[in-house]
Amino acid sequence: MQQVNLGMIGGGTVGGGVYKALRENGDLLASRAGVRIHLIKIAAKAFDEPRKVHIPHSLLTTDWKSVVEHPEVQVVAELAGGTTVARDMILTALRLGKPVVTANKALLSAHGEELFAAARQFGANLYYEASVAGGIPIIKALREGFIGNRIVRLYGIVNGTCNYILTRMKEEGAEFADVLADAQRLGYAEAEPSLDIDGHDSLHKIGILASLAHGFWVDPARIHCEGIRDLARLDLEFAGRLGYTIKLLGVVKLMGAAVGRARGKTRSRLVQVAVYPALVPNAHVLASVSHSFNAVFVRGDVVGDTLFYGRGAGQDPTASAVLSDLADAALDLKYQTRSRIPPFVPHERDGQVLPMAEAVSRYYLRLSVVDRPGVLAKVAAVLARNRIGISSVIQPEGHEGESVPLILMIHDAPNRAMTRALGQINRLSVVKAAPVMIRVENFE
Ligand code: HSE
């Protein structure tokens, strides 16, 4: 059977997982693909790093260049992470015409266009299934399964740490800071958690999915991003009473063709791409995606609604995605079809991201107000002045102290109007703390 030689960079969690999966399922993969993946070298930070999976010293080196430049290495897997040396690793391999498999979402988000251009220039492919939602084959689904669909909507729960924290806040009625501290103690959250909890990891992933779905590279700087650090136990509780669950969502919505202002009368594809916590109706399938699981909901104009669910991180799920890419890379080498599925095809020249100020949605608003007649009228007057309609109001009884919570559900309104109204509400003397605004997703 034909064999393809693999050089791997990264002997940590993901590298160890790929080593183990190849050892255990390499024969299975070979019998299905008709080509065997032969791991010949692994570059690691050190020979004696603590590893869950033992890697024989004979396979290890600490010199990544010697792996990439090894004359027998035909495919390189970059599983080291980071956005500086990892970029050099990938570019070095591509310049040598060697296809690369990577799990590195932060790198793709920051340097995707450059890396894809290099792949094109040097006739080598770049595969990145493991970069988004771990073991869920969402990249393959978008590039191949849905190639005949216009992607109308895509919603992703793509950060397991946030989903784990939100699930526990809801189930235990606990505050964010307490759950985060416990998650860090249990190893579910990083010691430096901001990449996850401030939404940046979700932004990297949702930017990759949005780009693939819409055929123009979405500049990460244009993706509106809010994390979960400001959510309170009360918000999950009130959302629950109203029939919703709060999830951190990555949102990609095709808004239709718009007349591009910058290009005169050119028609451009306008897409909303954003990451924010949202109230998800309990009847929607994404509301029941709990703990550290990920899910991606895709609506295509031909296929209709589809759902992908699974583990978005961890040694084995990530290894599963890397193996899928390795099989593709090996098959492309075997059949000399290096660019059968190019890493990214920019086919939408005039794609644009909708400015968040123009995005329209429903809202949940939690105010902390003095308990006095006329307060609701003052708040309602501000909303009315901004042409914003209220759909329901709750003021729970039994709260004691200076201020009480006031919950308003708001009809569809543009973000710009809502932001302006919130500023005005915040200045009312009867309002005692900064208003909390969370979007409500209706999945239409
Ligand atoms: N830290 C991520 C998560 C996994 O919690 O889902 C890696 O992207």
Image (cartoon, helix red, strand yellow):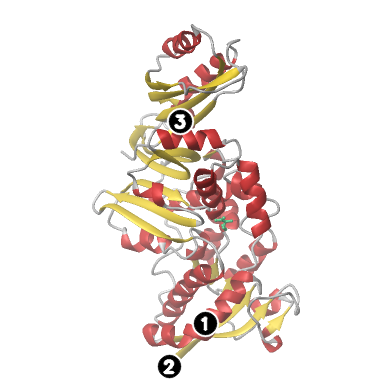
Q: Which residue is mark 2?
A: 1
Q: Amino acid type of disc 1?
A: Leu
Q: Amino acid type of disc 2?
A: Met
* Crowd class of label 1 (few under 14; some 14 to 19; many from 20; radius 10 Å): many
Q: Which residue is mark 1?
A: 22
Question: Along the horizontal axis of the image, is 49 left or right of 135?
Answer: right
Question: Along the horizontal axis of the image, is 236 left or right of 301?
Answer: right
- In the image, 228 versus 131, the foreground residue is 228
Residue at position x 40%, y 23% in the image: 410
Q: Which residue is mark 3?
A: 262
Residue at position x 60%, y 46% in the image: 197
**Above or below for 220 versus 46:** above
Q: Is label 2 in contact with label 1 (beta carbons under 8 Å)?
A: no
Judged by depth in the image, the label closer to the viewer, 1 or 3, is 1
**Which element type, helix, strand or loop, lies under badge 2?**
loop
Q: Provide residue 303's location: percent of width, then percent of height.
A: 25, 54
